Image: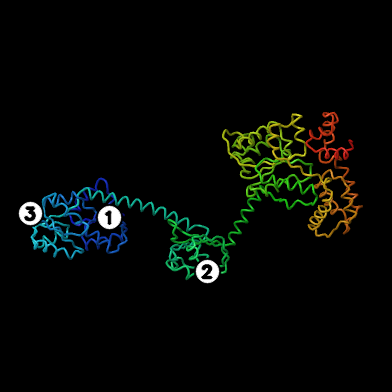
Amino acid sequence: MSLITFLAPDMSMLARAQQLFKARHTDIHIEKGLLSEGVTVASSLVAQGTEIIITRGGTASAIRAAGLEATVVEISITGFDIIRTVEKAKQHGCCIGAVSFPAILNGIDCLNAILGVDIRLYPIQAESEAENQVLQAFRDGADVVVGGFITAQAAQKHNLPFELIDSGEEGILQAAQEAKRIAHARNLEKTKTTLFRAVLDYAYEGIISVDKSGRITFFNPIAERITGMNGTKAMGRKITQIWPALNLERVMHTGQDDLGHILKINGVDVLCNKVVIAVNGQAVGAVVTFQDVTQIQQMEARVRRRIYASGHVANFHFEDILGTSAVLKQTIENAKEFALTHFSILILGETGTGKEVFAQSIHNYSDRRQGPFVAINCAALPSQILESELFGYVGGAFTGANQKGKSGLFELAHNGTIFLDEISEMEYATQGKLLRVLQEKKVMRLGSDSVIPVNVRIIAASNKSLKTLVKEGKFRSDLYYRLNVLQLRTPALRDRREDIRVLAQFFLKERAGIIKRHLKLAPSAIQALAQYNWPGNVRELQNIIERVIAVYKQETIDAAAIGRMLEDQDETTPTAGILPDEAAQIRQALASCKGKYAKAAELLGISRSTLWRKLKRLGLK
């Protein structure tokens, strides 16, 4: 059945509509029906799927009064239609009785002066009144009556002259266009509603909506599952009859959404959000959503597992950095201040001083904490592989490349942080490509000619003086200044000896707990640890503790045990601290500066007091 039906009051208009519609409106169904007969026909059509009915006058009013679930488009009676009818009626005489519904009669008597006639109005409100009004018009001296189809029927019954106010082609076609416009708008609305309902029905949340009186207007399947209630039976009921505790009336009264409450429904904890539906600032209803807390926890666990599986997570925070020394506290404070900016950071420090721990802590303290933390050791990979890891590549970019291509670490670090450890070992050509990424904030995959915008904070680290490498021509000066916007120096363990006891006891407790042994350090052992020079810093201290745990069988670890471990350690650890060539670098700096310590310290990128300590430790003074 067509969505639109043209309901003609007589066969004449039916034939006219068929003629008019056969070219442009073939999708409009045509039927005959006048007044009460038209209501019966319309009722049957609506049951078969008709949504819009085109008809005129009294039939349109009767269908509306019947309350059918259809839109009625009334064929308008134009001024031309009335003038044509009055001109015809003048053939019978100039006294004309106009018998019809008020909508048609409105203003018709204005034609008296224009057309030289005497039009008298006889309005009717129902089909049954037409015959009496026609007879009354003739009793009042009318020469002829004009009106709609029921007026014509009444006049014919008594063999009285009449002229039918008929609808012209313009009115019929205009009504057809209006019906199609309504059908199109309704179809768009249906499509939106269907899509919207599909979204709501298949959402992961239970969704219930109510109107401004608090009656339920929507109840999706997840809401049925959570509440254990049949949604169809719940429709139309007051929400307060089902869950008084929801208190949706307060939400609509205040106009304020109420989010993030935990409720228990059918013994299940659910996260509940209540949101006001407002039109022109007035609350017209509300929506309440439910989500099983257990489901939320499971989804969160899956997300966490996926993130951790990718390895792009910063695990350390500043609270994880152990120690109470003044130099460490100041370093942490500096790092926190740096974290609140978006500038590049260069972390300098000896091997084992926790440069990556600081990098991760900076990331977790910054506003990028929700983004990825991607780390790579620049010394661990050959140049070409390092470039493909950093910048990614398109399929077939080089022999052995993944045919689907691969995202680079800069892409993976988007909206997060990338940590470039041992940046000093990056080859000169790769440094130039890294500089371009820093300058343009865009990355180009190997083998590609297009760029990808990236928003990444760079933290680089080195255990060598990049300033010295710049002077030696081994590191690009422009890249150095790009990286060295903020500089953080991680203190050597020998420069914060008061932290050795805390660190040693932490490592002992942590490692011994794994093998379920209860060990403790004697005061003499702690003193021995504090007196050692720790060229390998915290990492070396951790190794010593692990070795003692593995070898020493007594419950209390004394100085003798520590001494033996340190003697063995001295055979494998360079005495120069973290930098195997540190002594050579210092000698070269002093020679370049003609023995002037202040200038040599500046050249090395360290303070004068630090240089003096290194000279003493290395036996160069």
Kind of element beneath mark 2? helix
Q: Nearer the viewer, residue 616 or 155?
A: 616
Q: Nearer the viewer, residue 222 or 103?
A: 103
The residue at which mark 2 appears reads as 245
The residue at which mark 1 appears reads as 73
Looking at the image, is 235 positioned above or below residue 5? below
Task: Answer with left or right where residue 526 lies relative to residue 79.
Answer: right
**Amino acid under disc 3:** Gly
**Amino acid under disc 2:** Ala
User: In which quadrant will I find the C terminus?
Assistant: top right
Q: Nearer the viewer, residue 25 or 71?
A: 71
**Amino acid under disc 1:** Val
Number of residues whose C-alpha sits closer than 10 Å to that of mark 3, classed few (under 14), some (14–19) or many (20 or more): few
The CA distance from mark 1 to mark 3 is 35 Å
The residue at which mark 3 appears reads as 93
Task: Answer with left or right where residue 459 lies relative to residue 507.
Answer: left
